[in-house]
Amino acid sequence: MGKLKPADPIQIQAAQLALRKAIFDSTGQYMPVTYCVNEDAARFMVRSDAAGLLAAGPLSPDEMVYANGPALWLERPEAKVIQAKIRKHLDTGQAIPRAYLMKSIGLLLACNPATTATIESIAAGSMRVRGAAERLGGIWALSKRQRDFIRTWESESYREKLSRTTSQGSLQGRIAVVTGAGSGLGRGIAIGLARAGAMVAACDLDRPAAEETVSLIRQEMPGAAAAAITCNVTDETSVEQAYQTLLQRWGGLDILVNAAGVAPAYSLVNLPADKFRFALEVNLTGYFLMARAAARILMQQGMGGSIINLSSKSGLDASKNNTPYNATKAGEIHMARGWAMELGEYGIRVNSVCPGNVFEGSKIWNPEYIKVCAKKYGIKPEEVIPYYVNKTILKREIKRQDIADAVVFLCSDQARTITGQTLVADSGQVMVR
C-alpha cells in the first residue's frame, strides 16, 4: 500500500467548494463541508478497490441513521461530475450521503456541525472494517430487509431526527461572515442571522468580544453553529487568514456583512489628520478587503451569494462635525453599487443598509460621543437619545434587531431580485433620493 501525500490546502478548498455546490445543485440544500484529517480514511483511500468496497452498502444501523450510508467515492473535485454522481445515488431511493471520500484529497463531511465528530467516527470505522473484512473473505453488508426494518424502526427514526440540523429560518444552512461582530450593530446582526438559521462567523479585532457574541448566540440557540474569528479588516494578511479559518471550519461562504466601523467626531477645523485616515482605513479599506476576498470565494463556489455594506443615514444626509463618517459612509454605498455591477453575472447580490441612530450596545454612541452631540445641539447628555428619537417620523427608537431584520431580508431569497440598492432603516428620517 502506497503512502498518501497530504493534499494541498488549495486543493482541499477547491474540493470543499465543489462538493458544496454539487449538493446545492442536487438538492437545493445549503450545507457546510468539513475536511477531516483522518488516518483510517487516508489509508483506505489509496486502496485500488476503495470505490468497490464503499459501494457494498451500509454495515450497521449507525452508518445508516447518522451517515446516510457509507462514504460516497469521488474521483475529482469537479462540481458537475460530483452532482451527476449524487443524482445517480439519489435516483436509487437512497438519502443524500453525509460522508464523501475524494481521491487524493481525503474525507469530507457534509452535515450539521454538531454531528461532525460522530459521522467522522462512523465513516472512518466503516472503512477500517471494510478493509479488514476484505482480507477475511469479503463484506457482509446489511440486507435490503434489514435496511428497510431500520428505516421504519421507531427508535432509529427518532435518532435520525436528532441528527438533523435543528434550527430553521429563511437563511437555513447558509454561511455568514459578520465584521465588527463583537459589539453594537455587528453583534446584533450576527445574532439576527443566527436566528434566521445561518451559520455565523463573528469576526472582530477584539477576540473576547467576538467570543461573547458567540456565547450569546449559543445561549439563545444551543444548536446554532457560530464561531469567533480574530480579524483586522485593515490588514490583507489578517483578512485572508480569517477566510481560511472559515473555509477550514465550514467549507464555504454565502453572506458577508461589512459592519466594522469607526466614527471620530470632530469639527472640520479640529479634525486630526490621523483620525481621518483611520476612518478611511476601517470604513473603506476594511470593507474593500473583506469584499474582495469574499467575492473570490463566492465566484469559485458558483452558488451566488450576498454582500451587505452597513452604511448609515449619514451616508445619504451628511451630519455636522462628522467629516470622516460622512465621507466613508457615502463611499460604502457607492462601492456597493459598483460591486453589484461587477458581480451580478455570478449571481452575487450587493446592497447597502443605512441605519438611523442605534444606541443599543453601540461603541460609537459612547459617553464622550454623546457629550459632543449634546454640545452640538445645546442640550443635556441625557436628552440626546430622546432628541434623536423625536426627529424620526415614527418617533420610535431603532433597535439592533430592526437592522438585523433588514439584513436578513436582503440576504434571503425574498430579495433575490434586489441588488445595488440602499435600504434605509431609520424610523423615517432620511428619504432616499
Image (tube, rainbow, N blue to C red):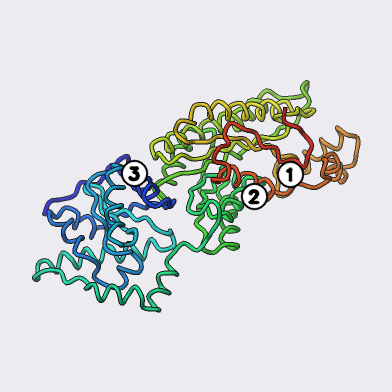
Amino acid type for the residue under numbered disc 3 = Ala
Residue toward you, 58 or 132: 58
Per the image, label 2 sits on a secondary structure element best described as helix
Mark closer to the chain start, 3 or 1: 3
- Residue at 8 percent across and 70 percent down: it is 137
Label 1 to label 2, Cα distance in Å?
Answer: 11 Å
- Residue at 86 percent across and 38 percent down: it is 374
The part of the image, by quadrant, that contains residue 52 is bottom left
Per the image, label 1 sits on a secondary structure element best described as loop
Is residue 211 positioned above or below 205 on the image?
below
Label 3 to label 1, Cα distance in Å?
Answer: 40 Å
Mark closer to the chain start, 1 or 2: 2
Image x and y of residue 60, in percent: 27, 72
Going by the image, does 182 lie left or right of 326?
left
The part of the image, by quadrant, that contains residue 38 is bottom left
Amino acid type for the residue under numbered disc 1 = Val
**Residue at the disc numbered 1:** 358
Label 3 to label 2, Cα distance in Å?
Answer: 32 Å
Mark closer to the chain start, 3 or 2: 3
- On residue 83, which mark appears? none
The quadrant the C terminus occupies is top right
- On residue 18, which mark appears? 3
**Residue at the disc numbered 2:** 188
Amino acid type for the residue under numbered disc 2 = Gly
Residue toward you, 281 or 223: 223
- Whether the residues at callouts 1 and 2 have beta carbons within 8 Å, the answer is yes
Going by the image, does 45 lie left or right of 162?
left
